[in-house]
Image (tube, rainbow, N blue to C red):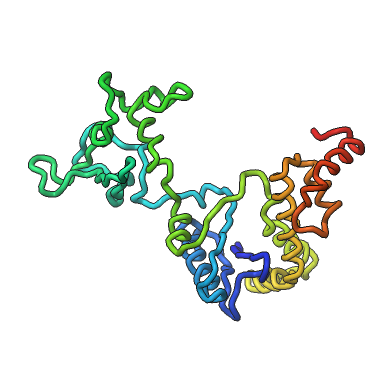
Amino acid sequence: MVSEFLTPDWGRLKDGDDEARILFRVGKNRDGYFDNDDLISQVDHAIDIFEGLTNGFATGLFLFDNAPSHQKRAMDALSAWKMPKNAHATWTHHKDGPKMRTTCFGEHSTIQDFYYPDDHPTMLGWFKGMENIIRERSLWPQRGLNAQCEGFKCEPGKTDCCCRRLLFTQPDFVNQKSCLEELITSHGHICDFYPKYHCELNFIEQYWGAAKLRYQNSPKTTDIKEMERNVLACLDDVPDVSIKRYANRAARFINGYFQGLTGPEAVWANRKYHGHRTLPASVVAKLKEEFLKRFGGSK
């Protein structure tokens, strides 16, 4: 398995012999399986390379597919999913994991710890429970609240029907970032994710396709080491100018959707205006009209 970083301006993210790419030998008896920890380690290295290339004077936008592994949160991240309603002596979100982190809430950023202090007279270090957490926020209703609605199937539009839903909709819980976002933003950079089912927006997909075509036409291999050499050779054979063209194509799709084009219209516009990085606003209306005349509207 190959994991790589591309840039619209430099092609592959590398600084001399130092590169962000990693080759991962997947399998139980090999390198295991590429998980969030492996991704975090690679991204941390990619940030170092980017900052080295820019001498620390640029802010990077790191974009990722909207995959579940990219959305994983830290072990101590805020989550009301498994919280008990009442105080508990040993509760943590993950078995044998760390305590949930301290948070802030309200207009004045009031600090809140979810665990009683170690000098508490009766419940030292206990988890406070959802009810006490909500009471500390002055949000507990007179009617009281159940821990959660049956099956957690809350009435649409309700935000205070149960303890779990109320906490889920609190700003500090809603704004909890993934491990990936926390790492990137802690370095002063920006992390974002492509929308699901829109591979045309991610120009690395064309890079993979070009490399796979080259590998398909390469000689057959007899062992894994030879296969790895061929894979790397095919990846390196994709020129930087092609990567920049892939990036421009993705940028045109993004710009086209931003200006209100449908999927078929954006595909057609990309072919017609492939020399542009963005679609001129002055031609979008004419483009829609021409598309309607040629194809009878989009479906």
At a point 77% along the width and 52% down the height, the residue shown is: 279
| Residue lying furthest right | 294
Q: Check the image and report above or below for 266 versus 163.
A: below
At a point 55% along the width and 61% down the height, the residue shown is: 26
Q: Position of residue 215 (x, y in %)?
A: 75, 66
In this rendering, position of residue 242 left or right of residue 78: right
The image quarter in which residue 196 lies: top right
Q: Position of residue 143 (x, y in %)?
A: 27, 19
Residue 33: in sight, yes or no? yes
Q: Check the image and report above or below for 296 versus 274.
A: above
The total number of labels drawn is 0
At a point 19% along the width and 42% down the height, the residue shown is: 126
Residue 222: in sight, yes or no? no
Nearest the viewer among 120 and 279 is 279
Nearest the viewer among 22 and 249 is 249
Q: Which quadrant would the N terminus be assigned to in this image?
A: bottom right
| Residue lying furthest top | 143
In this rendering, position of residue 82 left or right of residue 235: left
At a point 71% along the width and 62% down the height, the residue shown is: 207
| Residue lying furthest bottom | 16
Q: Position of residue 134 (x, y in %)?
A: 28, 33
In this rendering, position of residue 50 left or right of residue 262: left
| Residue lying furthest left | 121
Nearest the viewer among 192 and 202 is 192
Q: Check the image and report above or below for 146 versus 20.
A: above
The image quarter in which residue 144 lies: top left
Q: Which quadrant would the C terminus be assigned to in this image?
A: top right
In this rendering, position of residue 249 left or right of residue 87: right
